[in-house]
Image (spheres, coloured by chain):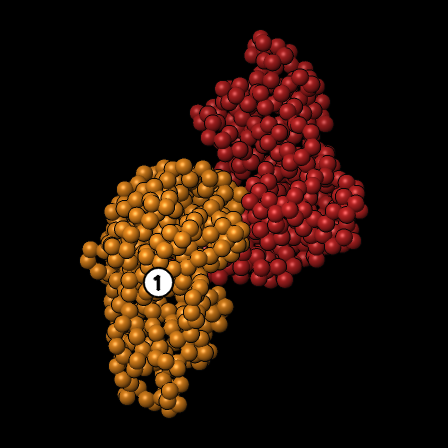
Chain colours: A red, B orange
Amino acid sequence: LRDLHARLPTGPDAVSFGLGMPSAELFPNAAYGRAVAQLLASDPKALQYALPSPVLKRHIVALMSLRGVTCSPDQVFLTAGGQQGISLLSRLFLDPGRVVVADEVTYEGFSAAIQPVRPRVLTVPVDADVGSDPDALQSLLRRGARPAFVYLIPDGHNPLGCSMPLDARRKFVALAREFQVLMVEDGAYGLLQYDEKPAPPLRALDDEWVCYVGSFSKILAPAIRVGWLVVPTWMIPLLSRTKQGEDLDVGNLNQCALATYLDAEDFPRHLERLRSEYRVRRDRMLAALKAHFPVGTRWNHPSCGFYIWCELPPGLDATERVDAAIAAAVSFVPGDVFRLGGRQLRGSMRLSFSTYAPNRIEEGIRRLGWVLHAVTDPGSPGHVGHVVVGGDW
Amino acid sequence: LRDLHARLPTGPDAVSFGLGMPSAELFPNAAYGRAVAQLLASDPKALQYALPSPVLKRHIVALMSLRGVTCSPDQVFLTAGGQQGISLLSRLFLDPGRVVVADEVTYEGFSAAIQPVRPRVLTVPVDADVGSDPDALQSLLRRGARPAFVYLIPDGHNPLGCSMPLDARRKFVALAREFQVLMVEDGAYGLLQYDEKPAPPLRALDDEWVCYVGSFSKILAPAIRVGWLVVPTWMIPLLSRTKQGEDLDVGNLNQCALATYLDAEDFPRHLERLRSEYRVRRDRMLAALKAHFPVGTRWNHPSCGFYIWCELPPGLDATERVDAAIAAAVSFVPGDVFRLGGRQLRGSMRLSFSTYAPNRIEEGIRRLGWVLHAVTDPGSPGHVGHVVVGGDW
């Protein structure tokens, strides 16, 4: 993904649907600046070593309650973003040869996190409408698999965009209890729900076998590098020791500035603003796909997160179109990047609708449509009027 | 060490010589606050994902030149503090059973960093006046040891406080070249030199086999969590991939705010102010030790860094005095904490002179002197006038 980032044209026309970057227009630069200024002016030790911020932990407990999760500050572990949460849990529970289960198409940062500990990876099928398959996990467990944990992204799946129905969530939690297997629930997008009454996270259904991975990257700002875990209390000292060896686990300026920001601001209102804006962008991308993508393309209709998953018509290879797209100053991530197991995914792509304003999204999808049509019809850059409507998936 | 931190009395009288905390009075809260404000006001993407800051890398190149090191920005790798640099190099080069060499008394964060990768540890003797013994390393290498790397702290050794003479540095570099063994040089304190003409770091003597670990924690502020490595360019993509799996390695607010701060401020002058103040604190602690510690105690006279190493007279056990010290609202770290191999160190302690103003140092050492005298003379809390002068070591 970083290679793709480095290759994206950076001109004023460039539209990236590739990386999961939040909208810069929605960053609270002014309010965050005020928080940093207030902290530095009022606390002479704001730049000193300190233990993880207890004030921030209490804010996170409040944030989790917005998702229907009851937890206490002593179950919250602060991390440098969600990625460090996944990495710490992997280091804590995995060993070479130890088994871990994940979706056969999943967040590529999960593969990067587990790679150094070289576990044995088993996969379960995942569907772009309903997410991970609990029956497949049941079958693995019944056949004797004893994974250290199961990694799931129940809300706004990365890269598939889908969210799991309540029924599947209940099944996963029941399996966790029956087989005493930890579930690592990646909730990085969980507070970005666009529809009414989303299903509760796994952590709301079980507090013993579910480790929740949270992050401020998508809901506030990635550059502050603050995330969290909600875990059973017995894990906290183990996580702390692991993190100390990695980066000392000393409370930092960002943690305290964020706590000051959350003290001063109406964060639920900020979240509502994000949801409202991202909902518009999702809808604009869905409409643009319908208008500009080749007939036979299928896509889903995410209710959460940043991503739409597209499957191109037979014969169209997404990976082969990356260069042509970049030449047209537009980017996406070919589906194969996210493959952990199972069949090749050369006909699919992940599109992020989060980064750009609606008009840029429209323009980018129009250009990407050209690039895709160019394969089936070499004259297609002038072909826009003839585009046939693709179907919802 | 964190346990010790948690137990330290926090009253207004408390004096900690335990943790290596820089002086909070020397933190540039106002200037750093201006830098953050300027960055957030001028760059709408300051809170976005971004690659490591190239501006900060150029500042680090300039900083390294103050130590006589010639390097280029493409040899600089940005980390979340020096600890992450050590941890990343350990993950990159060590494996279970792979050999690593370090001082038999060394930074306890090094032990924490290597622990998850379970290497085989060989040690070399280290002297509180002249540091690590190159002849011992030569002997290990001649007998066939092939370590992945050798971890050294040539300047302001933690915990011993000593700096290596030039002759020993040359020997280590010659061994690195002869046996093609990497040297990991921890330079966290290297810019805090209190005497004239310090010896150059190993990295100034060799750019192929030396990896330099740098940090802003001791010379600016720990809470911003910014450090760096200077390594051969071939290592950069490997470090980047490892860091991506851990915490995404995305340039962050702190990196860019620090670069803005360094653009605006006269950093060499800031360093001179630190050196001048810490030199006074060191001298005050040396004088206080002479005035208040039991006869027969020996200590060294550091020319760099934060620490003085004390060896108590026979019969005095530092570890056993920790609780009595805390009861007297003063703390130190018993030497045994830093032992990686070799004999027990129950008669020694590390004292940090960095954290408190000179008068507090005087008061803390006086109290610690009481605590130590209480063992040899139960009536000693009223015994101050009779303290016999200890010798320099």
Left or right of residue A173, residue B80 in this image: left
Left or right of residue B3, residue A279 in this image: right
Q: Is residue B384 above or below residue B64?
A: below
Q: Is residue B365 above or below residue A226?
A: below
The image position of residue B17, as x and y in percent, is 37, 70
Chain where mark 1 sits: B
The image quarter containing residue B60 is: top left
The image position of residue B2, as x and y in percent, is 48, 65
**Residue A219 visible, this angle:** no
Which residue is outermost to the top? A379
Quadrant containing the C terminus of chain A is top right
Between A334 and B167, which is closer to the camera in this rendering? Answer: B167
Q: Amino acid at mark 1?
A: Val
Crowding near the residue tagged with mark 1, few <14, some 14–19, many ≥20 C-alpha atoms within 10 Å:
many
How many numbered marks, from 0 up?
1
Give the residue displayed 56% in from the left and 36% down from the top: A20
Which residue is outermost to the bottom? B379
The image quarter containing residue A361 is: top right
Left or right of residue A289, residue A227 in this image: left
Between A110 and B152, which is closer to the camera in this rendering? Answer: B152
Give the residue displayed 49% in from the left and 55% down from the top: B120
Give the residue displayed 64% in from the left and 14% down from the top: A387
Give the residue displayed 64% in from the left and 31% down from the top: A308
The image quarter containing residue A271 is: top right
Q: Secondary structure at mark 1?
A: strand
Between A137 and B393, which is closer to the camera in this rendering? Answer: B393
**Residue A378 visible, this angle:** yes
Residue located beneath label 1 in the image: B126
The image position of residue A351, as x and y in percent, is 60, 29
The image position of residue B129, as x and y in percent, is 28, 65
Left or right of residue B147, residue A79 in this image: right
